[in-house]
Image (cartoon, coloured by chain):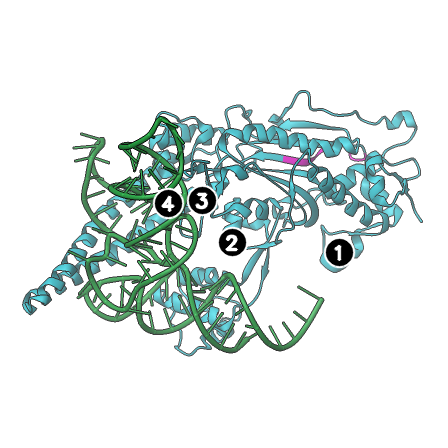
Amino acid sequence: MDGRDKPGHDTLKSAPMYDIKWIREHPDDFDRGLTRRGITRRGLQPLSQYLISLDERRRAIIRVSEGFQARRRAASDQIHQAMAKKDTAAAEALKAEVAECKTSITTLEGEQKAVEEELKKALAEIPNLPLDDVPDGADASKNVELKGHTFGAKRDFKKEGFTAKQHFELGEALGMMDFELAAKLSGARFVVLLKGMARMERALGQLFLDVHTSEKHGYTEVSPPLLVRDEVMFGTAQLPKFSEDQFKAVRKLTKGEGNDALIRLRNEDHSFNPQEETSAYFETLEVLGGGKKDVFTEAGWARFQELQQAGEWWLIPTAEVPLTNLVRESIVDEDKLPMRLTACTPCFRAEAGAAGKDTRGMIRQHQFTKVELVSIVTPEKSKEEHERMLACAEEVLKKLDLHYRVVTLCTGDMGFAAQKTYDIEVWLPGQNMYREISSCSNCGEFQARRMHPPGKPSEGTRYRGKDGKIKGFVHTLNGSGVAVGRALIAVMENYQDENGAIVMPDALRPYMGGITKIERS
RNA sequence: GGAAGGGUGGCCGAGUGGUUUAAGGCACCGGUCUUGAAAACCGGCGUACCCGCAAGGGUACCGUGAGUUCGAAUCUCACCCCUUCCGCCA
């Protein structure tokens, strides 16, 4: 809305993504921003032109369609009048005209729906535009270290006379980390933690939450749902593009839900035609036996699966999803902002594109624990809040006295929803590498726009000023504060002694019942 | 799982087939009055989209989807959600 409220105000930082009107008015800014992210063309056209041409087709259809609708309405009123005057002939003539209008309207509505579907799909898969100060680059090698944020130094194991082991070597030797046992239950990329390691995972989460809910950090602790609906995953932009990275929980539809799905299908005229009996849904499932068979057309089958999603939930890949969506479909009072939320939750990731990467140890798991930070703020405050959030995440690593550095991600390494991202990379002496332990992103109004009620794309999360007026979309930020699994690894590798025991950092001891060292029992 | 009642604009709430371009109230904005404020009074006040330089005009929207009808907030069907009660279970 910024673009319209303030004519001439067209910097990218307020670029209203998904607003086709904004794209229409600022095609060059739009294309330039996407080019920086390495996304340029659709065929030979710039992306903006493709979108604008779809939009023009859409508007042309609406223009004609609304003409017919206006005529239908007027004719209906005239029928009312004619009938009052008992002029049956005139009424019948008008009815015929209404019928003609209806035919045209039905056709045009179909066309309109198709074009809007295509436009919506295209817009939903366009990532956020980078802020001006984000470095350009195609991959992680172009990330830029953030000056003045490096903390601590690498521990000198050579001087101490032994080589640092990796976390899984330490954990397995302690008998507190079992990957084979986990594989028996769940396959690769799962782990069973036992005794001291299990307790340390709990202790870390608790420490982080205590730090962030302190008065100084000011986050509100939340225990959110871990299973969420499609539109929630769309809101934070895991969908539609990244469904392969997610886990899903499924239950069978009830009789009522299933039959509703079939009746909708029939109404939408996909060749499939169910019997009227109320048990049609389960009979259909039996006929299908899990496959498409010949009962459906391609489109009908796709739609059937879509309708079955009534009984499906996504497992959250991060608490960012439920925390950010707490303000979805709503108008937040300005005096409630900034809203700062934190949660310690399990996170689930399919890691589908990561075959062969980090296969040993618990760096990359299907399930891990993470403390997440989310801020909902007014647009003017988001940059400031981003720095603040980074400082909050850094704080827990400082408390654990872990050496880290901070990098600003370049345009090619940023996540889909981010305008700008800082990664905190902790030093892992066993791996002899810096590894990401936190990622803090400013998403601007990108997610706020997406968190609209299903079917009402113009009603995302906005805020109301003290004068009672709706001001615009909120800005959302999220960051890890920090990943508990990786923090566990970092503590293990950095605090190991030559016997393979783990010395407890001071900050953790109160949460470990006063234990100063974890060693093989 | 069973029963009953609900879902209408920022909020409350009326509305059971055609001047509903949704009554009324609250909140909010402007004005009159007042030293100032309150009260009172007068006026304004939904969202999205389309056409237009603009003034303005048009279309859609009463939980969601479909149906009946020349015409639906209103009638029919299914679903979702909320409230209360009962049953069952962590």
Check the residue under mark 1 and report the chain it is in: A
Q: Amino acid at mark 2?
A: Asp
Report if the CB atoms under discs 2 and 1 are less than 8 Å apart. no
State the separation of the CA atoms marked 4 and 2: 19 Å
Q: From the viewer's perspective, tell me whether residue A388 is left or right of residue B50.
A: right
State the separation of the CA atoms marked 1 and 4: 44 Å
Q: From the viewer's perspective, tell me whether residue A272 is left or right of residue B80.
A: left
Q: Do marks 3 and 2 both belong to one polypeptide chain?
A: yes
Reply yes or no: does residue A433 show up in magenta: yes
Expressed as whole percent of the image width and height from the top left, the position of residue A513 reads 87, 45
Q: Provide the residue span drawn in magenta.
A: A430-439
Q: Which residue is mark 3?
A: A460
Q: Sequence order check: which comes first, mark 1 or mark 3? A: 1
Q: Is residue B45 above or below residue A184?
A: above
Compare residues B78 and A39 and report the one nearer the observer. Answer: B78
The secondary structure that most of the magenta stretch takes on is strand
Residue at 91% x, 31% y is: A162
Q: Which residue is mark 4?
A: A119
Q: Which residue is mark 2?
A: A230
Of the residues tagged 1 and 4, which is closer to the observer?
A: 4
Q: Sequence order check: which comes first, mark 3 or mark 2? A: 2
Of the residues tagged 3 and 2, which is closer to the observer?
A: 3
Q: Which chain identifier belongs to the green chain?
A: B
Q: Which chain identifier belongs to the cyan chain?
A: A
